[in-house]
Image: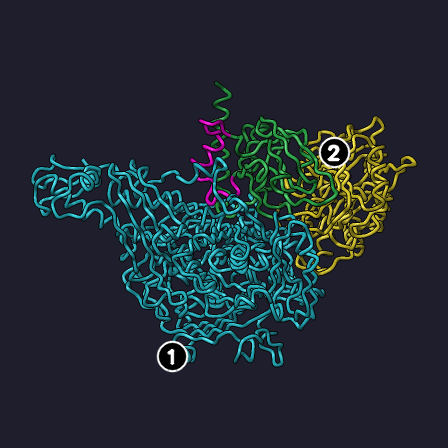
Chain colours: A green, B yellow, C cyan
Amino acid sequence: MTSLNEEVFPEQASDIPVRTVTITVNGEKRSANVEPRLLLAHLLRQGFKMTGTHTGCDTTNCGACTVLFDGKPIKSCTMLAVQADGHDVMTIEGLASASELHPIQEGFKDEHGLQCGFCTPGMMLTAKALLDVNPNPTEDEIRWALSGNLCRCTGYQNIVKSVLWAAVKLRGQAAN
Amino acid sequence: MYPSRFRYEAPRSLEEAIELLRLGGGEAKVLAGGQSLVPMLKLRFASPEMVVDINNIAGLDYHRVDPDGTIRIGALCRHADLENSAILHAHQPTMAAAAPVIADPIVRNRGTLVGSLCHADPQGDWASVMIALGGSIIAQGPNGRRSIPVADFVKGPFQNVLAFDELAIEAVVPAPKGVVNGGYLKLERRVGDFATVGVAIALESSSGVIIRAGIGLTGVGGTTINAIEAAKALIGGPLTAESIANAGDLAAQGAQPRTDHRGSATYKRHIVRTFVVRILDGVVESMERAA
Amino acid sequence: MSLDEIKIGGMGASRRRVEDNRFIRGKGNYIDDIVLPGMLHMEILRSPFAHARIKSIDTSKAWGIPGVRLVMTGEMMASRNLAWMPTLSYDTQAVLATDKVRFQGQEVACVIADDAYIAKDGCEAIVVEYEPLPVIVNPLQAMAPGAPLIRDDKENQHDNVVFDWEVGDKSGTERAFAQADVVSKLDLHYPRSHPSPMETCGSIADFDRATSKLTVYMTSQAPHIIRAAVAMVAELPEHMIRIVSPDLGGGFGNKVPVYPGYVASILASILLERPVKWIEDKTGNLISTGFARDVYLRGEMALRKDGKILGIRMHTDSDHGAFFSDAQPSKFKIGLMHSAFACYDIPVAHLTARGVYTNKAPGGVAYRCSFRVTEAMFFQERMVQAAADDLDMDQAEFRRINFVGDDDFPHRTAFGFLTDSGQYGKCLDVGLEAIGYKDFLKQKEEAKKRGRLLGIGISTMTEPLGAGNSREYDILGIKMFDSAELRVHMTGKAILRTGAKSQGQGHETTWAQIVAHELGIPADDITVEEGDTDTAPFGMGTYASRSTPVAGAAIAMVSRKIRAKARKLAAHLLEVSEEDVEWELGRFYVRSSPDRGVTIQECAMAAYTNMPDGMEPGLENNAYYDPPNLTWPFACYIATVEVDPQTGVWDVLNVVAVDDCGVRINPMIVEGQIMGGLTEAYAMASMQFITFDEEGNCIGSNYMDYLLPTAWETPGFELHEVVTPCPHHPIGAKGIGECATVGGPAAFVNAVMDALKGTGVRNIDMPLLSDRVYEALTKRRDVSGMPPMRTDDV
């Protein structure tokens, strides 16, 4: 198993004990030795090599690092990796199966809901959490739910359409 | 973006947490929602020797209303829990109005009301709400529990009165003695912005006469402002255009804003007045509807 | 039968984006995603002061931290002649400060360590002793007698003036003003802003001692310019430098210049012989890298009573920060400011421009903008509305009277640009119809009676996109052309490389569509590659909406070269002479016998297996395109707002955009660009700015203070189009990426000002924060946004 300590902190010379955490990431149990100060976003990116989770700001505003923590969106740059011990985390890498895209991913592509792609993983995970609890949201409900995720490229209108697209498809799947 | 080194402890009980805080000797920080603490760690505005994470302590994530009407919010109750709370929608309009405008939706999934109060940011929304409601904090230390009115809880910007080995475990809104009304209005430039101005009003009335009033102001002073004079002026009569305007003026006088990039002091005072009037006008409307 | 162009993803197809396949899976490859073996991490220590002499730097504690590999200071850089670097505007900029710091956030030292956390620990352990100096935060202070000299490092620099520049006809303009019935005046400030892509800047420098090759992965919109700059700064041979610009998390002009962090990471890698990664934090990005705007205008318009504009006089004072590092054509000191009023028929105009140094971050980058056209068009459209109001004329009618007519092209503007096409009146009509102009004016009057303030703002403009031509446009002497290289493989599939560099514009998708349009090869059969200077042909990069006008044209031209060779191959295969061969999309056929034909794919196969005697094998070529002129898209943006008179808060009711960007290659992507641009326009008008207090502290150094709108505030947009093909572009396209950011802000501001009409208020500087609007309304006076930020009540 990845030992982040060995990989990332080879010269670690502090008397602060390294802690072993075990996190269920995208359904798979992963363990790592981490310094307490390591942020969850950095463990996911550097320790687990899941670089779809991005870090965009220092101040918990942008939401590019959003992951689902026990099913709810959180900003993974604002959680210590040690806090995730024993919890369930879903990243963008877990949204689709190997062969098939999630309807939210299809929606974002079909409605041109992304441009540079940097905010997109966080946006899509927030959208998933919304559709999990509200399968038929209004445009205002989508805008409200996404208001903790900043996008600099799209102007949001196509993101809203993407989520509506996904909602229709997901409702169709649920009906079948 | 990268915090300094600290020790991390994740106690499983209150007693254990308090013992750790005692051992920390004032150099430990409590981590609940972490939505203020972790950014401060990242920016190295805070460099504690130890972080005591209380998220693994069972039984703190509640909010409930007691049979007598007292509302209790546990230290791990998240903003989102309050935003979606049927209890608040039914019983506590001031809190119900404030919950959706705290930070942004994702931050609300982690941040806690009790943690916000402890953080004592003059621009924090919950402190005004709790001051308006006459709420208090239950703190537990090595020698047991004590109750501290929120109005006395904040010592200054980012400073509370807790001893280093005390932990805030619950916020309490006292049981109302009359019909509950109120609201919260926040002037923010966009979602997730701190309040340029926030006004919280909590009222209790009996047969249309105000028997209790509280007004808390966000972002217009070195700490949260308790607009006592304005609140007092409302008590003992019905809400009238005159009493409402008077309360607005008194609240504006009670504010101590500074001119900054969010607006001039004059403007902020004006917004305090305007928001007091708007909330109270709304209360009049809803009382008329109820009657 | 000819191919269905839409089906093969050609011109006009809203083809779904190729690059999305990786982005939606979280498989993009951004700078911070790249990990090289043995890689170290660099963090930068920045100055807390805006202006201070450095008395001493003690790095000993940082060296003592386990895991710290290198600590670099200005002194160390100076010993290698690297303490200063050239900017893109013939100035110099400190890499790491030696003598003094000149803005808050300036780079002072770097720590390279085993990971970024330790590097940050190292920065914290460095002790710098500063002696604070007086601070300048606006042009008035910079020009004041006895102002402290910011650039005392430069010989012959005795004041804080960067340049004095002028264009136009001074005496002619004076004559026009002498004949005017009315002179309309307006003073404006376009506040300092920051492009602020979601991803910050960063680099990974990897110097390989064994091969002497330096590879730098870098967030660059213009990797070839960077390669040239690195060759000059680091004195390395250009062929031993490879710049790779990976997926960029947005750019908007921020990622054009050379930054100290890049240079420092390169030196660190050379010294340590290991890869060194530098990822800037958000604060570093906002306070030190290329800002935009920060220009003051004194504008005057000479008017005849009937509404005809007789002449324009403009003076700008621009604040360039501590180093003149604007990214713009070298001939034009204040960029293309003189493109103002290009859509109006104006007999004569004169512009004077002065640039000054201040103790603020350097930059002056074209933030979603062709070199200051954003300021130019904002000033223009604010002056136009003020003039219409001064004449008490309808603002739409005033524009119509002064537009260059459809039949008056080519048109030489008063400042010397040549516009070549447009249907300005039609665009305006479409916009007015869509917003319901007449109805809204009635609604507005009705609302006013009930104490509600509604307003409508119009902004119409044509702007010059797609620099060059090379006669007039160069950066550091490098002419502004662009390039494409196309290789068609044996089986008819192809790879296309260009000198442009996408940052979200979707080049991988649209470039293939141009090839599909020219050759009939399905877009899905074409790979597009950019950003690696070892493989891509030389180009000037992507900014200033120049990719479609220049690189896009090069793609069409190289495709035509390929088609010309394929025609010879077809003639050979069909056993007829070349003159007897006709082309339809994807196929050559015999003119006299249309059933006899060969596909482009069959020609490709022949190029490798069955070419005629004497023909060079293979099917590949390149094209360098030097456009004959700029392209001139036109736009009409209209916004309606309601202002709350009690709070000054304003809400957008409706936004209509009518864009004429010529032929649209991919309408879906074009619309995406317009909506993104409108959002930045709304952001500028409503909340997004960087200001400074009197000590030079940056207000707007993170996303708590530098506000980008969320999905909640951002209004919805209604888009319309008019198509006037560009007469000189090979496929009739014009630039579009920045139009809405350039033209949009004035629509929002004009709308709020329209709501305040009759109060005597002529201007509120952006952003129109609610307190500014309230102050204007209640005190019936203009509100200036000039820093320093107010700290006393007024």
Vertical placement of residue C546 versus A152, above or below: below
Image mark for residue B55: 2
**In the rendered structure, which segment of residues is drawn in magenta?**
A96-120
Q: Position of residue A75 (x, y in %)?
A: 62, 40
Q: Which residue is mark 1?
A: C172
Q: Is residue C533 magenta?
A: no
Q: Is residue C451 visible?
A: no
Instruction: Give the percent coordinates (x, y) of residue A120.
Output: 51, 40
Residue C196 in sight from this viewpoint: yes
Residue B167 picture location, percent across and down:
83, 38
Q: Quadrant of the N terminus of chain C?
A: top left
> What residue appears at the point 40 percent right and 55 percent down from the top-left corner?
C541
Given contact means CB atoms under 8 Å apart, are the residues at marks 2 and 1 in contact?
no
- Residue at the far top: name it: A176
Q: Is residue A105 magenta?
A: yes
Q: Is residue B198 left or right of residue C205?
A: right
Q: Residue at x 47, y 32 (%)?
A: A165
